[in-house]
Image (tube, coloured by chain):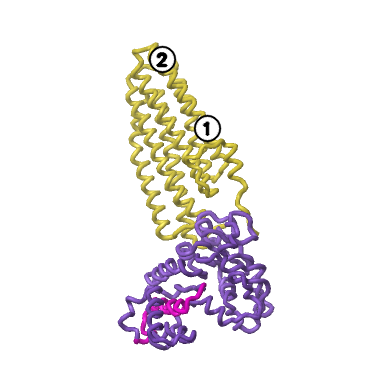
Chain colours: A yellow, B purple
Amino acid sequence: MKHISEQYEQELSQIRDTLMELGGLVELQVNNACSALVTHDVTLAEDVRDQEPTVNQLEVEIDDQCVAILAKRQPTAGDLRAVVSVMKVITDLERIGDEADRIASIAIDFGDLTQPDDQYADFRKIHTSAVKILKRTLDAFARSDVEAALRVFEDDEKIDRAYNKTVRQSIAAMQNNPEEIERTVRLMWATKALERIGDHAKNISEYVIYQVKGKDIRHADRTEQQWTEQLNPSKSIDN
Amino acid sequence: MTEQDPQGTPEVDSGRACLEMRDLSMWYGSEPALNGISMDVQAQSVTAFIGPSGCGKSSLLRCFNRMNDLIDGVKTSGSIKFYGAEINHDPIDVSELRRKIGMVFQKPNPFPKSIFDNVAFGLKMQGYRSRVEIEEQVEWALKSAALWDEVKNRLKDPALALSGGQQQRLVIARAIAIKPSVLLLDEPASSLDPISTLKIEELIHQLKNDYTIVIVTHNMQQAARVSDYTAFLHMGEIVEIGATDQIFLNPVHQQTEDYITGRYG
């Protein structure tokens, strides 16, 4: 049901729209940063770095819009949870932007190197997973989809496992191939940035669940199955 | 609280219940106003009734001290117990009930007497004769109503010379002077400016240590600020009752959510 106040309705959809714009931009940043790294495309990496202030500016803009709604409308219940969630989500999105910036800066360092034999195969895989998880969590937010949000938890664990495997392999690679140590260490940092993106995506999914269900599930250690059981039944519908 | 809704509402705590309603219905002539209300009001807490105009919240409030008796054609059925004693059916001493369950209305209604006499009025009606005792009680009531400092040097001035906010606190002082157990507040701040409203809200917060308070308000933020429990009424029925934090953060019923977020109608 819509608000009696059309203006209020517009203000709420405005913050969601701007948030999705920020989400889209951050997604693009991550994608471009990773592409720049694996293709040694310094120009693309510099583009990513140039966009960082735009991400920050959008974060501040949404923050201001949320504060204005809190001050003027005193939202309650679902509206309040929506505004609070947006304020938290933008922090995670901005940090994902920082991680993209970090990867881009490593991509610039790689500019003069030759392509490695494996063409950064492991990094590419984790990159694909990170982009997928980011897309899924943003979709879950846009659609208030708790089930999609719960799947993000599993995706994040997969990324964590893949990252740990990469670390072990990198240590072995450095022992076997000492002249590649510098590149391997930097690549590990870039992979760590992708792993952090997974963590931020998971945080965003927690806010989706908070917004929809009113339950704060941060810092709780449960399986997806347990959450699914606990988060149902859904709100009763009168009339 | 209510027994009708197992989801998300606090357990019935009859040990602390001050007022217990069971299947309470009320009609103005043939027009139903309340329909099968069952809920408890917890002692020494603030319970707020919210809901759209005509939902029955003021009618329900007036059931608690039988104020509806004064309206022609009102019929009630069901039970209201005040600390275990049935008050919805005769024979009861209605004036004694109203002494124990005081009421403050939307518009401040001080008597056209002095500030002092307004507060002393109920005491004299109660049979207090000692001047010293009356003066002590008046001072205590005015202090409790957070008005003493503003009026202590002009107790003989007419009450009607006070500001709206002061008049409302005077009326609350008059109500608590006779030491009731329950205070019913029907839109007590709706005609006051924001500062006076905050003073009344602060007063409610302090008074709940000694009194059970039931407040009807159209101002949902006020309900959120002052009450421990909130009941949402619609068309003479309780849609949802629960801890105020839960009602305003995560209500169980969609209808409550629509009302408190301004999606009603």
Residue type at mark 2? Ala
Q: In the displayed structure, would residue B171 be above or below residue A194?
A: below
Q: Which residue is mark 2?
A: A173
What residue range appears in magenta?
B156-181
- Rendered residue at 64%/60% (across/down): B3
- Asked if residue B166 is among those painted magenta in the image, a careful observer would answer yes
Residue type at mark 1? Asp
Q: x and y percent of residue A178 in the render?
A: 35, 13
Within 10 Å of disc 2 (Cα), the crowding (few <14, some 14-19, many 20+) is some
Residue B21 lies in what quarter of the image?
bottom right
- Rendered residue at 62%/72% (across/down): B85
Q: x and y percent of residue A160 in the render?
A: 47, 28
Image side of residue A43 versus residue B107, left or right: left
SS class of the residue under badge 1? helix
Seen from the viewer's position, the closer of residues B234 and B13 is B13
Q: Which residue is mark 1?
A: A155
